Amino acid sequence: MAKPNQAITVAGITSHGTFTNKVRFTVNLVRRIKQFVKVNASRIDLVELPNPMSRLEAIAYLKTHADFQSAEDQATLDEAVETRTPKTPKVKAVKTVKTPKVKAAKVVKAKVVKTNAKPTLDAIKARAKKTVKTETPTV
């Protein structure tokens, strides 16, 4: 089984008994056929692509291939295109929200009042200690 973004080299249609047909992709034809034989697939129609392709390109190639011209095969391929085509996201209407008007902040000038209050003991302890340099006499 090929990874979603990997270039495909083999594509085709398989079915398992009464189940519906499915479009299959791979890069290794022999391994994929062995897988379907092991699970008793009733139909295994895989073809090698002329060059590596994306999944949508491979489906477009299969629609033109002579082995897949029946109405049932074309319907299976059309369904595969629908499921693999990127869907356009629905655009929701954007609600406009009114922003409230903000008044400019008023500038308040603070008055500096000098007081003759004495410093507290905590304020005195919080002050930086002064270092005193002392000279030692040389003898």
Image (spheres, rainbow, N blue to C red):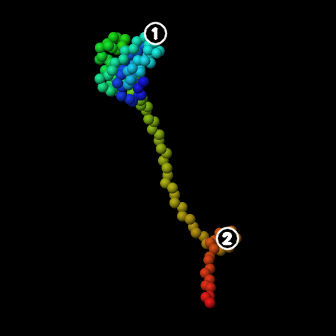
**Residue 55, image x, y percentages:** 36, 25
> Mark 1: which secondary structure?
loop
Q: How dense is the environment of label 2, judged by Cα within 10 Å: few (below 14), some, or many (20 and up)?
A: few
Q: Quadrant of residue 129?
A: bottom right
Query: Between residues 117 and 41, which one lies in front from this camera angle?
Result: 41
Q: Amino acid at mark 1?
A: Thr
Q: Is residue 82 visible?
A: no
Q: Is residue 28 visible?
A: yes
Q: Quadrant of the C terminus?
A: bottom right
Horizontal arrangement in the rendering, residue 93 relative to residue 123 (left or right): left
Q: How dense is the environment of label 1, judged by Cα within 10 Å: few (below 14), some, or many (20 and up)?
A: few
For the point 39% across and 30% down, which residue is it?
Answer: 5
**Residue 60, image x, y percentages:** 32, 21
Query: Between residues 56 and 129, which one lies in front from this camera angle?
Result: 56
Q: Quadrant of the N terminus?
A: top left
In this rendering, the answer to whether 75 lies above or below 111 is: above
What's the mark number on residue 125?
Answer: 2
For the point 49% across and 54% down, which residue is it?
Answer: 104
For the residues labelled 2 and 1, the Cα–Cα distance comes to: 93 Å
